[in-house]
Image (tube, grey):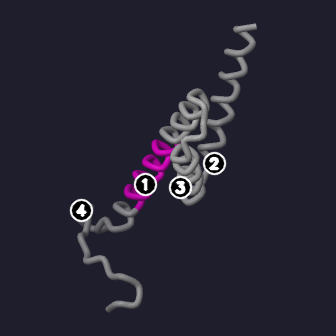
Amino acid sequence: MQSALISKRDQERKSGSKMRKNLKFDDAIKELERIVKELESRDLPLEKALAAFEEGVKLTRHCNRLLEEAERKVKVLTRDSETGKIVKEAWEEEGQG
């Protein structure tokens, strides 16, 4: 019985990991907000609270990876084609300038 339970948990982790890889940043943030509200309600049993917290940590790591990837893309797009150095330009808000 315990091995079946462990196997089920492994399957859930793998499927959750695959789902997270396809999860867009905005959707991950919304899910994190939902988890925070759930945890703040204090109505969760300890096991469910720990599971929600664990999922939140995984979503946070996923969001960080997406942000790092976006930062790398921005650096590539702002690299001077002749020198290869990153060009620092002032960031202009939309509607300014």
Mark 3 vs mark 1, CA separation in Å: 12 Å
Residue 26: mark in rendering: none
Q: From the top left corner, tell me how far across and down residue 80 is, in percent.
A: 28, 68
Label 2 amino acid? Answer: Asn
Q: Which residue is mark 1?
A: 67
Residue at horizontal 32%, vertical 92%?
Answer: 97
Sequence-earlier tag: 4 or 1? 1
Image depth: mark 2 or mark 3 in front:
3
Direction from residue 97 to residue 36 in the image, left or right: right
Quarter of the image for residue 18 reads top right
Label 3 amino acid? Answer: Ile
Sequence-earlier tag: 2 or 4? 2
Image depth: mark 4 or mark 3 in front:
3
Mark 2 vs mark 4, CA separation in Å: 32 Å
Q: From the top left corner, tell me how far across and down residue 62 is, in percent.
A: 50, 45
Q: Which residue is mark 3?
A: 29
Residue at horizontal 57%, vertical 57%?
Answer: 30
* Label 2 crowd bin: few (<14), some (14–19), many (20+), radius 10 Å: few
Direction from residue 75 to residue 2 in the image, left or right: right
Q: From the top left corner, tell me how far across and down residue 25 is, in percent.
A: 54, 56
Direction from residue 58 to residue 92 in the image, left or right: left
Q: From the top left corner, tell me how far across and down residue 5 is, in percent.
A: 71, 15
